[in-house]
Image (tube, rainbow, N blue to C red):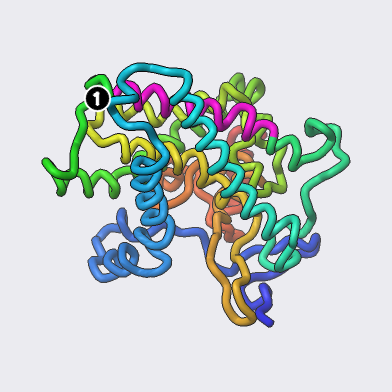
Amino acid sequence: MISDLDFGKEDSRGGWAPNKRVSYGPAFRWPPQPWAFLKWVFGFPGYLLPWNTLFAVGAILIWAYLTPSLETLKTFSFGWALLILVRNLVLAVLVYGAWHMWLYVWRKQSTAFKYNRSWPKTDSSVFLFNNQNADNMFWTLASGVPIWTAYEVLLAWAYANGWISIVDFSENPIGFVALFFLVPFIHEVGFYFAHRLLHWPPLYRVAHKLHHRNINPGPWSGLSMHPIEHLLYFSTILLFFVIPSHPIHMINLASRLGLMPAQGHTGFDRVVVGEEQTMDVSYYAHYLHHKYFEVNYADGMVPLDKWFGSFHDGSPEAHEAMKARRLRRGV
């Protein structure tokens, strides 16, 4: 059987950390590295496969089969808005629930590749119902999904009424496809700046503190936020008021914002899929954010944390640099 000690090491407290340092893809490396860039774009795992392609195809299917037509959307109705809400609730339960069931209910790999070997708290007064998972599910389904849906309903209505320029595949196939490549960048940059704003002390105390109760996150922690944070987090969707696009691209971004936090908060580096095989699902950068609060406000391909001095790659050197920054601030 495969061992997580082949990929990382365990500390004195039982926590596990990968040997591989957090890094960005080659999209922003200088000087350019064309071969590395092509491998990153078309490799597996890479930029296209599996996740960006999965969300792009998912958006096409959601638009084709699970969204009312533009003609229907032109006239606002609570009926079609409710349909979109139910659709998003089902998607959230399926995606968050699948990660949670596999890793936390069935515990298919026990604590192998788990950053924090302990399980979510079930007797803590910090959380609603004294239960971390129940608390996270409440905020995700009672606040997160409805606010995600409200933004989506607003944009769908705007597309249908001509308030947003629609880029149609039949008229502009290159632009239509290119927008699928742009969506992950919009997602990441929007998330970074919204996240930095949420760490402004007044907003942190009022809203973001709720999310950060999850020092040891699980899948349902991903969208467990205060409603104020949900409003800011999903507001990136509003950029499509000024970016000509198709409703499919808006759904692509909305579903990424709504569903990707499940993977980003699994608390596991890899999923074991066979006796000698694993699937890399690492969001170690974001786990370090939950652990230290002031690093890695974004993670992915755009090195925003490097540019703004908040990057932590998991190395002892990065940890010392973080402590030095704290000392300079007198913390």
157 magenta-colored: yes
Q: Assign a secondary structure to mark 1.
A: loop
The quarter in which the C terminus is drawn is: top right
Q: Residue furthest left?
A: 171
Secondary structure mostly seen in magenta is helix
Asked whether 273 or 318 is in front, the reply is 273
Residue at 32% from the left image edge and 40% from the top image edge: 248
Comparing 201 with 43, the one in front is 43
Quarter of the image where one finds residue 254: top left
Residue drawn at (22%, 49%), measured in percent from left and top? Answer: 177
Q: Position of residue 41 (x, y in %)?
A: 31, 62
Depicted 292 relative to depicted 109: above or below: above
Q: Amino acid at mark 1?
A: Ile
Camera-side residue of 10 and 121: 121
Q: Which residues are magenta?
A: 138-158
110 vs 62, left or right, is right
The crowd level at tag 1 (other Cα within 10 Å; few <14, some 14-19, many 20+) is many
**Residue 83 % position (x, y):** 48, 30
> What percent of the width, then of the height, locates residue 180?
29, 47
Is 127 placed left or right of 97 in the picture? right
- The picture quadrant where one finds residue 48 is bottom left
Residue 131, placed above or below residue 82: below
Q: Is residue 1 visible?
A: yes
* Residue linked to disc 1: 164
Residue 292 is at least partly visible in this image: no
Q: Which of the pair 97/270 is nearer the observer?
A: 97
Looking at the image, residue 114 lies above or below residue 254: below
Q: Is residue 320 a member of the stretch shown in magenta? A: no
What number of labels is visible? 1
Instruction: Relative to 144, say whether 281 is above or below.
Output: below
What quarter of the picture does the N terminus occupy?
A: bottom right
